Amino acid sequence: MTNAGTGPVFPGIAGRLALVTGGSRGIGRTIALSLGAAGARVYLTSRTLEAAESVAEEIRAEGGEAHGLALDLSQPEAAAETCQQLAKSTRDDGGISLLVLNAGMTRDGLIMRMGLPAWREVLDANLTGAFVVTKSLVPAMIRGRFGRIVALSSIVARIGNAGQANYCASKAGLHGLVRALARELASRSITVNAVAPGFIETDMTRELPEATRQRLLEQVPLGRLGTQEDVAGAVLFLLSDLATYITGEVVDVNGGMAM
Ligand code: NAP
């Protein structure tokens, strides 16, 4: 991705090794494609290798470099092993320096009906998963004295949402993780931030009944749902050299729905 005559739109991304968890669909896919277009060497994950490889193939078809990986974050021990293998196999190239913790899932239910398995699965995938991936990949960033970590949170971490106690808690937990790591890793020039999308056009929001969609839109001052590109733009900005002095921040991308 370049700006005619003025160099890359997002400087500092080309040539770096990037990992996008949950890059097979939705926002993660758009982030992975944008990173590929910006010249990053992209690793992207899905729970199935085929789904990850199909997006990697799209990047390669545009002349980029990309690799698909199978990773299920609801199994944190196995996920840690996969990420440690990735750290090992990329060690000679300096390791992953751009990390996007995008994978996320929901298992909604009102508290009276939400069982411990639904609570645990969402906390494991969204929060513990982010911890194990980061823990495996951060040693290379520390060695290289450079890193950019961006976690995908959500507006509901701040404003809450009925029926999503597990999801809201997992995303609010990411804010704490991001701020702790930002302090811990700053001396090695590693920045750690979150992007908190509002309601974005994805498969999930496309399925909403028209009346619910209208009610939501009335709460968004900019008068539309966000696009996946709106979110990817904020993520690439935080990964780039335009954002070297931003760390420990949660950037809202919600059309003004919460401010
Ligand atoms: P999505 O379309 O549902 O895609 C989720 C991605 O995460 C997929 O690539 C999926 O891979 C992966 N994933 C799901 N469960 C996983 C698990 N247990 N282990 C590993 N990977 C898993 O999601 P999205 O709407 O693009 O959202 C992306 C991120 O933004 C999420 O963290 C979400 O919470 C956050 N967000 C989204 C919205 C929105 O309006 N869409 C709003 C706020 C925040 P598979 O191929 O294996 O399914």
Image: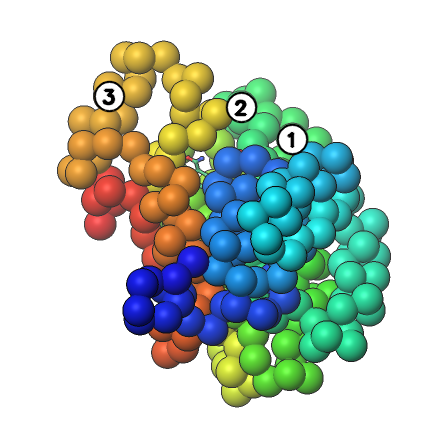
Closer to viewer: mark 3 or mark 2: 3
Give how far across and how far down residue 190 sits, in percent: 53, 77
Q: Marks 1 and 3, Cα distance to the nearest angstrom?
A: 28 Å
Amino acid type assigned to the residue bearing label 3 in the image: Arg
Q: Label 2 neighbourhood size at 10 Å, few (<14), some (14-19), many (20+)?
A: some
Of discs 1 and 3, which sits in the foreground? 3
Q: Would you place residue 65 above or below residue 241 in this image?
A: above
Q: Position of residue 92 (x, y in %)?
A: 78, 77
At mark 1, the secondary structure is: helix
Is ligand 1 within 8 Å of the beta carbon of the residue shown at mark 2?
Answer: no
Q: Is residue 155 visible?
A: no
**Mark 3 and mark 2 residues within 8 Å of each other at the beta carbon:** no
Q: Secondary structure at mark 2?
A: loop
Task: Label 3: state its secondary structure.
Answer: helix
Question: Which of the marked residues, 1 or 3, is nearer the chain's N terminus?
Answer: 1
How far apart, in angstroms, are the residues tagged by discs 3 and 2? 21 Å
Q: How is the image coloured?
A: rainbow
Q: Earlier in the sequence, mark 3 or mark 2?
A: 2
Q: Nearer the viewer, residue 78 or 10?
A: 10
Q: Which residue is mark 3?
A: 215
Task: Give the residue pinned by disc 2.
Answer: 109
Task: Provide the residue designation for mark 1.
Answer: 118
Among numbered discs 2 and 1, the one appearing first in the sequence: 2
| Residue type beneath disc 1 | Ala
